Amino acid sequence: MLRRSLPRRPEARRILLGTLLSAIGRGLTLPFLFIYLTDVRGLSDPRAGLVIGWYGAVTLALSPLGGTLIDRFGARRVVLPSLLIEAVGTGSLALVDSTASAFGVATVIAIGGSAIWSGQNTILASLTADDERQRVYGLNFALLNLGIGMGGLTSGAIVDVARPVTFQLIYLLDALTYLTPAIILLTLPHVGRRLAAGAAGAKTGGGGYLTVLRDRPFRRLVIFGLVLTTCGYAQIEVGFTAYAVRVVEVTPRVVAWALAGNTLMIVLSQLLVIRRMEGRSRTGGLAVVGAVFATAWLTLGAAGLIGTGNALVAALGVVACAAIFGFGETMLSPVMPALTNALATDELRGRYNAMSSMIFGISGVIGPVTAGPLIGAADGKVWVAVVVGGCLAASLIALSLRPLLTAIQDGRPAVTAARTPEPTPA
């Protein structure tokens, strides 16, 4: 299955290697930023939260500009400096000693990170054919999670709140790993160039983001993504954790096990899911994702009803929720970018990918803000009802997208009209 999922072109395989190596560095630091800012550098909880929120807001604000620059100058000229800026910013976290410096470093990291995701997706799209793109994006997601898991296991054995130098070490290592995809891209001089000669003029005559927003199927896909990620992905960081700790009353260690189970599910099942989804309707797969996410939240809600009455069963429910959610992620990760690039044109491919990445940024602001008040109402039952209903609503939106797509765009085999055989001469 791994051999089948690998892209045909060696350049694309090397780009995937860069994803894995940089993800290991990301995993080193991913769980610890809040702890580092508060317990090591002495920022208050609200100030640390503002720093993290500021990073998300700046990234979201700059994402459209990143897409425009990718279309105008090529992904290569945008991704390379972005990776260098991200490396400098991440390494500078080791030197943070005040709220002001934390905001400054977060700004630098956001500037670098605002175009990396859309740029790398654009590069992968340029190196893969339509019939392999969905598999490659799925493999990219699996490698991303594998790297994060490896990095998290490594940093868990290194960091110590009583020894700030251990946190400084992992941020410096993370900075170095951001240089690996940059070095790989530098060894591929013809990769990431501008895809279409007309891209430079895309800002005129009704081009640019107005053209992207006029694309009815893509507009429907964006609505689906906003609803699904707001009630799905965006709830993991705050909603899932808060409900598990406050309502189900499990320990933070159980939450850590649950997140580990989520990563394990993705790594073990991604290749199998890619194989099973090949040749099937992409919109049907997206609808299933909504149903799977809803099932995950219902499982968590059931754990909340059990609560301390049976602590072991409740803890298993929390872990099961995260694992089920991870299975849904394995279906979403290959389909969403593949469908985005099936709808995109070469002239506007950077903007399409930038708008797709903005979905996660917007929902990342809405989800955490709404999760707290909803969990505080009726012992979390209102929150469960809202996220379950939102995921099911996303499934209906996905099904409504299918009539707007061609069979090729939807990932289904094209149906060719049967030809009437010509009569054979006597």
Image (tube, grey):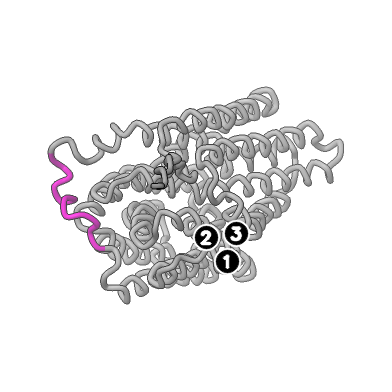
Residue pointed to by mark 2: 139
**Proximity of marks 3 and 1: CB atoms separated by less than 8 Å:** yes
Which amino acid type is marked by label 3? Leu
For label 2, count other residues whose C-alpha is less than 10 Å away and answer few (under 14), some (14-19) or many (20+): many
Q: In terms of sequence position, does the residue under pointer 2 or pointer 3 come before the other?
A: 2
Which amino acid type is marked by label 1? Leu
The image position of residue 78, as x and y in percent, is 27, 59
Quadrant in the picture for the N terminus: bottom right
> Camera-side residue: 252 or 402?
402
Residue farthest toward the bottom in the current orientation of the protein: 187
Taking the spot 55% from the left edge, 59% from the top edge, the residue there is 142
Taking the spot 38% from the left edge, 34% from the top edge, the residue there is 217
Label 1 secondary element:
helix
For label 1, count other residues whose C-alpha is less than 10 Å away and answer few (under 14), some (14-19) or many (20+): few
Residue farthest toward the right in the current orientation of the protein: 310
Q: In terms of sequence position, does the residue under pointer 3 or pointer 1 come before the other?
A: 1
Give residue 364's mark.
none
The image position of residue 88, as x and y in percent, is 35, 66
Label 2 secondary element:
helix
Which amino acid type is marked by label 2? Leu
Residue pointed to by mark 3: 271
Residue pointed to by mark 1: 2
Report how far apart the C-alphas of labels 2 and 1 lie in the structure.
8 Å
Tally of numbered tags: 3
Q: In this picture, which residue range is highlighted in magenta? A: 193-204
Q: Quadrant of residue 109?
A: bottom left
**Proximity of marks 2 and 3: CB atoms separated by less than 8 Å:** yes
Is residue 22 found inside the magenta-colored segment of the image?
A: no
**Proximity of marks 2 and 1: CB atoms separated by less than 8 Å:** yes
